[in-house]
Amino acid sequence: MATETSVTHTLGPWTVGQRREPIRIYSRFGSIATVGGEAPDDETRSNALLIAASPMLFASCKELREVCAVAMRVIVAQGPPYLIDLFEHELQQIGIRDGFGVRADQAIALAERGEP
């Protein structure tokens, strides 16, 4: 029987330090990561900013997944049947073809358990 492993992370917010070499990411507890080498470029700094946004993005992903799930439950329970088809069609029009919330679930599993 497989057991679920919980991965914990340093609480946000995270920020990117002002020094260019090396680029460090900080929490209120101190430095948590170093990104890039001796002469980081703009892409490396952009990657550091994305990493620093991770706690906020993670919380937003979980929140939006729940909001969307509630909206879908309301549509299924209260709306006419054609709304479900319309909703799925609109998702496909914006490139969501793998199913409702699949990528969010995978991202959350990766962040919480270290596995997609």
Image (tube, rainbow, N blue to C red):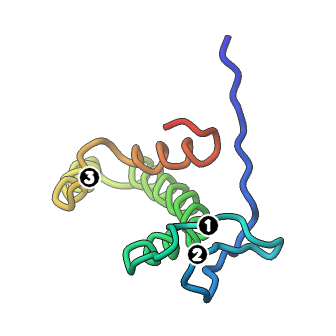
Q: Amino acid at mark 1?
A: Thr
Q: For the view shown, which residue lies furthest in the right direction?
A: 29
Which picture quadrant has residue 16?
Answer: bottom right
Residue on which the image places disc 1: 34
Label 1 or label 2, whichever lies nearer to me, is 2
**Can you tell which mark lies on residue 22?**
2
Foreground: 1 or 115?
Answer: 115
* Disc 2 + disc 3, Cβ < 8 Å: no
Which picture quadrant has residue 44?
Answer: bottom left
Looking at the picture, does residue 11 appear above or below residue 84? below
Q: Earlier in the sequence, mark 1 or mark 2?
A: 2
Q: Earlier in the sequence, mark 2 or mark 3?
A: 2
Q: Amino acid at mark 3?
A: Ile
Q: For the view shown, which residue lies furthest in the top direction?
A: 1
Residue on which the image places disc 3: 96
Foreground: 72 or 10?
Answer: 10
**Can you tell which mark lies on residue 67?**
none
